[in-house]
């Protein structure tokens, strides 16, 4: 690292980190900036925040809006035009195939990836099972709705959009329709709102989204300086797990609003010189029909020695799910989305 810090050209360059303009995105960008400043105190880092198409369109359901590029496209234009140097994302929002000339430079240590139940202030309920029949539960995720309908057909699931503060305000509005929300725990924790978590929803009740809880830094593929800086940020255990999950999703051709859930763990971890050299990777994936009536789930475990091995395991799990019925579910979802989007 010292050789990087002492590079004269680097010391004259200000690396600009960019993200969406929401409060959570700014907090996450500052986490990355602080990590870089701690590792490279002699270098200069700035921030820039912008509004994306996903932020602008707050009225239409994510299920109908389509893929994850809603959250990243404008940022990637700025990156490719050299306006900014690094993009900070929630990795779950990043498409599994990046634009030409862009790559993931770093994946940071993951926060707890689970989803959480958040009940309206003043209500006594502590679990989903306690909610009265017909209670309205807000979430913008078709994955959550599909899985929870399977176990909780007595609840009503309503779309809710906006940043976390907006969604919580909608929840707590005495005249609002929501009894509870389902939110990613990691976002609440980063916003300092972990005390709003009523209960965590863990597998098998709810499998989380691919890469949920992890931050990623996207860079230009030809920016070797940024790539070197990003190495200081990467948490290899998180990297291996998340890249396995992303390989699963890529093979399933799933986007932001496809009901693919995962749960991943590493055990028997071996390291050499501080670098991860092998581990036993276990990954569970599931695909659920929108009405919750069909649920395809499987688990694979394998010893892996590198990122490629982790990605291969994720791909193999996707192929297993597809052969067991997931393809039919995904085809039906694609047809349904096209039909509803044209109405």
Image (tube, rainbow, N blue to C red):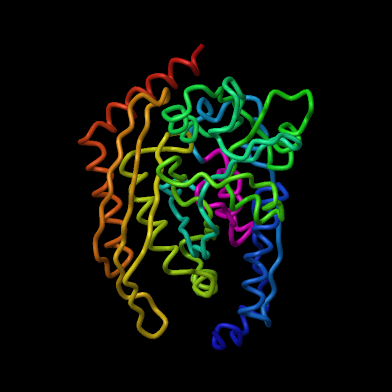
Is 77 magenta? The answer is: yes
Q: Residue furthest left?
A: 323
Image vertical order of residue 292 relative to residue 306, above or below: above
Q: Nearer the viewer, residue 43 or 310?
A: 310
Percent x, y of residue 161:
65, 32
Residue 181 to residue 249: above or below:
above
Residue 17 in the image: state x and y as whole percent.
Answer: 65, 61
> What residue is at 35 percent from the left and 45 percent from the top?
250
Quarter holding the N terminus is bottom right
Q: Is residue 257 left or right of residue 180?
A: left
Residue drawn at (22%, 35%), measured in percent from left and top?
324
Image location of residue 300, percent across then percent down: 25, 52
Instruction: Indicate the position of residue 314 as horizontal and vertical percent values.
Output: 30, 52
Q: Which of 108 and 81 is in front in this view?
A: 108
Q: Which residue is drawn at 58% across and 45% down?
A: 199
Left-right relation of 306 to 237: left
User: What range of the chain is rendered magenta?
Assistant: 69-92
Q: In which quarter of the image is residue 123?
A: top right
Position of 182 relative to 300 (above/below): above
Q: Is residue 8 left or right of residue 266?
A: right
Q: Is residue 237 magenta?
A: no
Seen from the viewer's position, the closer of residues 245 and 185 is 185
Picture quadrant where residue 240 is located: bottom left
In the rendered image, the residue lying farthest to the right is 174
The residue under the point 63% across, 30% down is: 160
201 sits to left or right of 254: right
Residue 176 to residue 267: above or below: above
């Amino acid at each position: 690292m010292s050789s990087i810090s002492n590079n004269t050209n680097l010391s004259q360059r200000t690396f600009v980190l960019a993200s969406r303009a929401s409060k959570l995105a700014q907090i996450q960008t500052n986490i990355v900036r602080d990590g870089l400043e701690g590792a490279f105190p002699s270098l200069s880092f700035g921030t820039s925040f912008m509004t994306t198409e996903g932020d602008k369109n707050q009225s239409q359901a994510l299920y109908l809006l389509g893929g994850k590029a809603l959250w990243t496209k404008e940022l990637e234009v700025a990156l490719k035009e050299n306006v900014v140097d690094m993009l900070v994302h929630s990795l779950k929002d990043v498409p599994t195939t990046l634009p030409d000339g862009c790559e993931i430079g770093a994946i940071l240590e993951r926060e707890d990836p689970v989803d959480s139940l958040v009940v309206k202030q003043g209500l006594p309920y502590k679990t989903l099972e306690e909610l009265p029949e017909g209670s309205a539960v807000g979430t913008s995720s078709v994955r959550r709705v599909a899985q929870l309908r399977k176990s909780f057909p007595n609840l009503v699931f309503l779309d809710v959009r906006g940043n976390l503060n907006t969604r919580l305000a909608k929840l707590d509005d005495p005249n609002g329709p929501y009894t509870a929300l389902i939110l990613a725990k990691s976002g609440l924790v980063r916003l300092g709102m972990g005390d709003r978590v009523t209960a965590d929803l863990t597998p098998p009740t709810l499998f989380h989204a691919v890469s949920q809880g992890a931050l990623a830094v996207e860079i230009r593929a030809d920016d070797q300086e940024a790539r070197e800086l990003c190495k200081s940020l990467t948490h290899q255990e998180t990297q291996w797990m998340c890249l396995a999950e992303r390989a699963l999703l890529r093979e399933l051709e799933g986007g932001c609003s496809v009901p693919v859930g995962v749960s991943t763990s590493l055990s028997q971890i071996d390291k050499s010189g501080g670098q991860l050299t092998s581990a036993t990777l276990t990954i569970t994936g599931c695909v659920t029909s929108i009405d919750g009536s069909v649920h395809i789930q499987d688990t694979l475990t394998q010893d892996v020695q590198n990122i490629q091995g982790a990605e291969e395991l994720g791909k193999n799990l996707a192929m297993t799910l597809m052969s067991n019925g997931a393809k039919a579910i995904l085809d039906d979802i694609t047809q349904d989305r096209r039909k509803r989007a044209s109405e």
